[in-house]
Image (cartoon, rainbow, N blue to C red):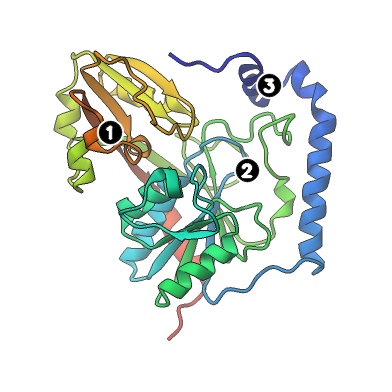
Amino acid sequence: MRKPGGLEAALQSAWLHGGLLAQALRPLGALFGLISQLRAALYRLGWCKTATLPVPVIVVGNWIVGGAGKTPTTLHLLQLLQAQGYRVGVISRGYGGSAEGCSLVSRASTAAEVGDEPLLIHLRSGAPVAVGRNRVAAAEALLSAYPQTELLISDDGLQHWRLPRALSVLVFDERGMGNGRLLPAGPLRQNRRLSAEPQLVLYNAPVASTPLPGHLADRRLAGAVTLADWWAGRPAQAEALAALRGKPVLAAAGLAQPERFFSMLREQGLAIQTLPLPDHHDYADMPWPANTATVLITEKDAVKLRPERIGHVLVWVVTLDFLPEESFGLALLAQLPSRPA
């Protein structure tokens, strides 16, 4: 079982609780903050130009490093906006992908090419998705290919100042703002005073974890589906997950916070052996022992595992229901610009 070790473990503890290491890194955090403020000021004063796009952009991001729930939030926004009749596209950095420039994601794409999260978003929602280091160029590529698009969601990109945004959705989990300091003295990627656009706060947690007013989201496991059926588009079933209680299973997760997944499985009454993997683990080789019989993975892992690669192992994909309060959807729709007649 992989656990954070050495400097990684010390940093994670310091980012949450403070201590001597966080104090020692404060000068570097101050330098990071100064550079961030300078970049933001260049755009605010007009010396660097924010791009112009013909459709509004909603940026989904978090101030804290590590997974706080951006992808489930993006998927929920897509569902909400599509239900309102919006034609929505998604742009993403495509972290972990090898594609150069900008690429449009398709069912034939691989996570190695376009990144695991963009591929998952496209497979789950059917929405057009474009990836690229330059978010503005990715947006332009998507709008050129899908000119009927009325609205864009940027999966991450809060610190991509050239990207225009009509609204930002800030996602926090139980960690809140950690020790409240900027990298590397703390986990914050930006000073909270840098953003000027309208913002909504969503807590991927049972209770608010910062002083910022916001909305809560309930996360729960929806069920399980075999890897082959998941790729075929079949839904997960709660009964399939419940049937695994009392059986020896291994749970693997290539997430920033894998223990969150493991805890949810235990809450369902499963006795699991855990295999935490690095975030965005590539699954170039099977990470579990060859004699493993049954494995549970997340959808983020599933996009990197084709059924023909798993041999005799029975792999179940465990899916997540992510349900923000109704007030979140109402607040979001109220802040969107009026649709063209």
Residue drawn at point x = 51 percent, y = 60 percent: 102
Residue at which label 1 appears: 318
- Residue 326 appears in the rendering: no
What's the amino acid at mark 1? Val
Q: Answer with left or right where residue 104 lies relative to residue 165.
A: left
Residue drawn at point x = 34 percent, y = 41 percent: 303
Q: Which of 223 and 193 is in front in this view?
A: 223
Kindly indicate whether the residue at mark 1 contacts the one at mark 3 (C-beta within 8 angstroms): no
Q: Could you classify mark 1 by the number of other residues whose Cα lies within 10 Å: few (under 14), some (14-19), or many (20 or more)?
A: many
Q: Using the numbered discs, state the Cα–Cα distance from disc 3 to disc 2 in whole angstroms.
A: 17 Å
Kindly indicate whether the residue at mark 1 contacts the one at mark 2 (C-beta within 8 angstroms): no
Residue at which label 2 appears: 63
- Secondary structure beneath label 2: loop
Residue at which label 3 appears: 14
Q: Residue furthest bottom?
A: 341
- Residue 216 appears in the rendering: yes
Relative image position of residue 133 (x, y in whole percent) = 58, 54
Q: Of circles 2 and 1, which is in front?
A: 1
Task: Point out the image quarter for the N terminus.
Answer: top left
- Secondary structure beneath label 3: helix
Q: Could you classify mark 2 by the number of other residues whose Cα lies within 10 Å: few (under 14), some (14-19), or many (20 or more)?
A: many
Q: Using the numbered discs, state the Cα–Cα distance from disc 2 to disc 1 in whole angstroms.
A: 27 Å
Q: Which of 186 and 276 is in front in this view?
A: 276
Label located before the other in sequence (2 or 1): 2
Q: Answer with left or right where residue 306 lies relative to residue 127.
A: left
> Which quadrant of the view contains residue 217?
top left
What's the amino acid at mark 3? Ala
What's the amino acid at mark 2? Trp
Q: Of circles 3 and 1, which is in front?
A: 1
